[in-house]
Amino acid sequence: MLYLPQGTSKNIRNFFPELHAYLLQHPAVILRELKQQFPHVPKFDQTLDELVARNWVKRQDRRYTSQIASWPQDLVAHTYLEPIVAEIIAEIPPKTTLEALWASLPVIEPTEPLAAPADVIASWRQDQVSQTVLESRYGVLTYQNALPQTTIVNFFSNPQATATLQEIYQLIGDVTVDYYLDQALPKIFRAQGKNLKEGRRDIFTESLVLFGLLTPELTATVVPSIQPTTTTSLTNVQARFNQAAQKIAATFPQAVSQQLMVLLRGQIVAAALKMGYFNQEVSGDLAGSWHITKIFKI
């Protein structure tokens, strides 16, 4: 099975897995053979040139071969990362917030395709999730002045926590957190500094208004944070995380190391949540500091 990074065009997503499989069986083929094999692919020459430019396909002496890295057969991600996770968890100071920990684990979203067995790719999903998914999975609630707040995290933890959350539940029902974020986050990005232009508001737009993330005029009230910020209180955590990144990058091809770093971050945060680091009420500015973090999702 072939993993393709987020943002890959539809044409390449539809065509490249088939091309990769063919090139594995027929290495060093010429352009005429490829055109005969894939007559159904629109803009074939242009698409192939793009794949060569990305270095996903190698063109040498007018012949083409696949350049895609493969997941090592003997690499079990959880087993490999477990001792690294334990070392980093030991460095987390008391009273760390989930937001601060997340910010101290900077990861570049995977940009390289990778060939791996289907079961291996499926196993990545539990660690390739957003901060919001992890918070909701482990029941972390946001409070202010000892009262639960109307946030996305709280909705997926306890939709009955506030009257507004109950109203949102009546609107969108038992939607999964992954699906909700896939539908809602693009709207917030499109509404930065301007009104979200929609001919007809759907249930996700209405829910974002109720969450307070869009104004009634459909302008975003939050600025999504894509680049993590540093935090001095977690210097040791970040240092060990960076050391692990250097070791992983020196050991594995780039496509494999990128996936491992995403998995490492997810396992660190999940382990901290399981240990109960963040299951406590907070108030004041800390409770109001929640923001959307856009992160790689399969």
Image (cartoon, rainbow, N blue to C red):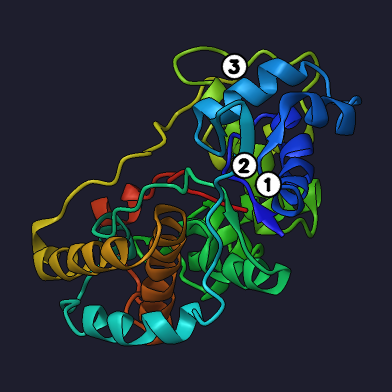
Q: Is residue 285 above or below residue 158?
A: above
Q: Is residue 95 above or below residue 129?
A: below
Q: Amino acid at mark 1?
A: Pro
- Within 10 angstroms of label 3, few (less than 14), some, or many (20 or more) residues? few
Q: Earlier in the sequence, mark 1 or mark 3?
A: 1
Q: Measuring 68% from the left and 54% from the top, which residue is drawn there?
A: 2
Disc 2 to disc 3, how far (Cα)?
A: 52 Å
Secondary element type, mark 2:
strand
* Location of mark 2 (residue): 65
Marking on residue 27 = 1
x and y percent of residue 286 in the render?
Answer: 26, 56
Q: Measuring 38% from the left and 80% from the top, which residue is drawn there?
A: 81
Can I make out residue 115 in this image? Answer: yes
Marks 2 and 3 close (CB-CB < 8 Å):
no
Task: Mark 2 vs mark 3: give the one in front.
Answer: 2
x and y percent of residue 37 in the render?
Answer: 87, 34
Q: Amino acid at mark 2?
A: Thr
Marking on residue 217 = 3
Position of residue 45 in the picture relative to residue 260 (left or right): right
Q: Is residue 130 above or below residue 221?
A: below
Q: Earlier in the sequence, mark 2 or mark 3?
A: 2
Disc 1 to disc 3, how far (Cα)?
A: 56 Å
Position of residue 272 in the picture relative to residue 210 (left or right): left
Q: Nearer the viewer, residue 78 or 218?
A: 78
Q: Quadrant of the N terminus?
A: bottom right
- Within 10 angstroms of label 2, few (less than 14), some, or many (20 or more) residues? many
The image quarter containing residue 5 is top right
Q: Amino acid at mark 3?
A: Glu
